[in-house]
Image (spheres, rainbow, N blue to C red):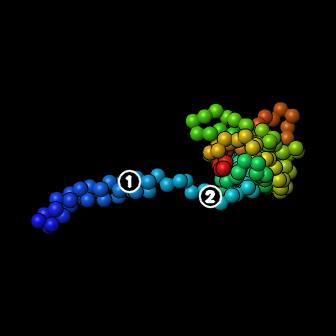
Amino acid sequence: MARRGWLAQLPRTIGIVSAVGFSIGLAGCHPKPVRPPLLMNATFELTDQGGRCVPSNPQAMHANRGSHLVWTIRNRCSQPYYVRLDRFTPPGGNPTTILRPGAPETNAAIQPNGSVGLPADVLRTAAYGKYKYEIQLKGSGTNDRFEIRLDPDIDIWP
């Protein structure tokens, strides 16, 4: 008779164990995003390609609110260029201000074979997440205007 009671409980025990296992499995399916190591310095080069000065793709930066960032820019082009980083945009969103200054720009044109550090600070009010931004270049002529040349990424983490 005792065996019969144990067999009667078996389906219930299997059901409980299955439910617990399923719950643990669900919890494991949605792990917290793994935070990449902070990277607050990036380097890119300007090089002549097909008659145009083009920036290389800097490594994606990973920073916290309040972080101090520096982009190091090396000009390997034959002409001097101003550089501006602008239009920081979250996926599916509109450009927003996440840095101070809002659109970091070189104070002077970077001379051929010259190098410049372009600093900015992440605002303490910047929303967390990934942003695309534009690297814009402008020649040193009086009528030259900034043109979009590349759109790399930056991540802001808690």
Alpha carbon distance from label 1 to label 2: 28 Å
Q: Which mark is residue 36?
A: 2
Q: Nearer the viewer, residue 117 or 30?
A: 30
Residue at point 73%, 55% (across, down): 40
Identify residue for label 1: 23
Evaluate whether residue 55 shows in this view. yes
Is residue 107 found left or right of 92 in the rendered image? right
Query: Percent position (x, y) of residue 73?
Result: 78, 53
Which secondary structure, mark 2?
Answer: loop
**For the residue marked with disc 1, what is the amino acid?**
Ser
Res. 5 image quadrant: bottom left
Residue at point 65%, 50% (across, down): 157
**For the residue marked with disc 2, what is the amino acid?**
Pro
Query: Percent position (x, y) of residue 120?
Result: 80, 47
Q: Nearer the viewer, residue 122 or 30?
A: 30
Asked if labels 2 and 1 touch by Cβ distance under 8 angstroms, the answer is: no
